[in-house]
Image (tube, rainbow, N blue to C red):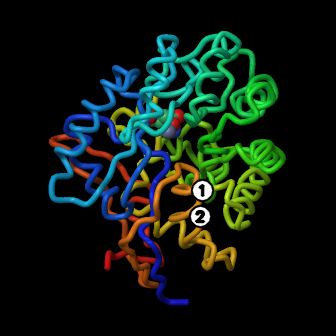
Amino acid sequence: MTELIITKPDDMHLHLREGDILKHVVKDTQKQFARAIVMPNLKDPIKSVHQAEIYYQEIKKNTKDLNFEPLMTLFFNNALNIDEIRKVSESSLVHAIKLYPSGVTTNSADGVDAIENCFNIFELMEKFDVPLLVHAESNDKNVDIFDREKVFIDRNLSQIHGEFPNLRIVVEHISSKEAVEFVFDSGDKVFATITPQHLLFDRNDLLSHGIKPHHYCLPILKRSEDRLAIVKAATSGSPKFFLGTDSAPHFKHEKESSCGCAGIYSALSAMELYASIFETENALEKLENFSSKYGSDFYKLPSNKSKIKLTKKEFKIPARIQVGNKEIIPLFAEETLSWQLSEI
Ligand code: NCD
Ligand code: ZN
């Protein structure tokens, strides 16, 4: 196959940030995706529908002539009460609530400390059919970083799903074979997003032959067997697994540092990367559902009308993206990919 025309995809897990970064990165995303689930972990997290409406306007201001729709989310917090959850369920802008255990990742200090104190909110979300998006990693300091996803699933997520079987859950950016098994084995309300980095890399690509700060993200890259389980899930044709890049821009100097930030910037060439993986697996015919259907079905949104074209053609990823006098290094910087995307 040398050309693939598919419905324009949606990115169901994206970090746009704010201010100058937002201005730049939203342009990359809108070339690839018609809509995106926008994560709420700003420095001052988006905790109410009112804040989400203001953030939505900021994003729209930067996409003036562009055909792009941000799908907003709230940062799970203890102030969520019945009125606010009802508001979310009635809002056409806000689509879900994202739970971060406190301290697990970028800008998550305000996250949840004790999951067991959140059950009244889960109950309301289940009742009002508001999806729960989960950064499924334990914040227990005694848990090894490579086991944090598995431990969170065993200690917390299984219990949440057991107590609230009708609560729609997305396990975000799955990184382990245990997460794949949990999603496959749970009822039809449990889904997962899959990033390009967890399909392409394992921890050797992060830590072997020199440390690669631009491959550092959370959940951290794991073993080869974990990567293979995720590839299998993505290309299985199961509607439980859909595209979410987790594209998360940080400046070069913040990543190449003695305490480097977690997050990989993949928005520039996400679809080209997914296409390469699906091609390697002989599963290109499954790419459209994974990228353009299962995610919007989960969020009960219509499919996009526009299309994109992926052509088998070499294309080199730029070395950097300039944002004022600072730089963001994109995933696969200066490397050549074998697919190229164009809008039609
Ligand atoms: C994300 C970010 O930088 O906001 N970082 C990451 O490594 N994925 C947050 C997140 O999704 O964990
Ligand atoms: Zn993320």
* Left or right side of 311 for 137: right
Image quarter in which the C terminus is found? bottom left
Residue at x 17% of width, y 44% of height: 61
The image quadrant that residue 67 belongs to is bottom left
Amino acid type shown at disc 1: Phe
Compare residues 17 and 127 and report the one nearer the observer. Answer: 127
Compare residues 104 and 128 and report the one nearer the observer. Answer: 128
**Residue 242: mark in rendering:** 1
Amino acid type shown at disc 2: Phe
**Residue 257: mark in rendering:** none
Asked whether residue 268 appears in the rendered view, the answer is yes
* Left or right side of 259 for 66: left
Residue at x 62% of width, y 79% of height: 285
Q: Are marks 2 and 1 in contact (CB under 8 Å)?
A: yes
Task: Find residue 140 and report its horizontal and vertical position in percent.
Answer: 70, 16
Compare residues 69 and 281 and report the one nearer the observer. Answer: 69
Q: For the residue labelled by badge 2, is the local secondary structure a helix, a strand or a loop?
A: helix
Residue at x 52% of width, y 31% of height: 98
User: Dot 1 surroundings within 10 Å: few (below 14), some, or many (20 or more)?
Assistant: many
Residue at x 47% of width, y 26% of height: 86
The image quadrant that residue 243 belongs to is bottom right
Counting residues from the start of the chain, the first of labels 2 and 1 encountered is: 1
Name the residue tied to disc 2.
Answer: 290
Instruction: State whether residue 284 is above or below residue 155.
Output: below
Instruction: State whether residue 15 is above or below residue 322.
Output: above
Asked whether residue 261 appears in the rendered view, the answer is no
Q: Is mark 2 within 8 Å of ligand 2?
A: no
* Left or right side of 8 for 200: right
Task: Find residue 165 and report its horizontal and vertical position in percent.
Answer: 76, 34
The image quadrant that residue 156 belongs to is top right
User: Dot 2 surroundings within 10 Å: few (below 14), some, or many (20 or more)?
Assistant: many
Instruction: State whether residue 89 is above or below residue 9.
Output: above
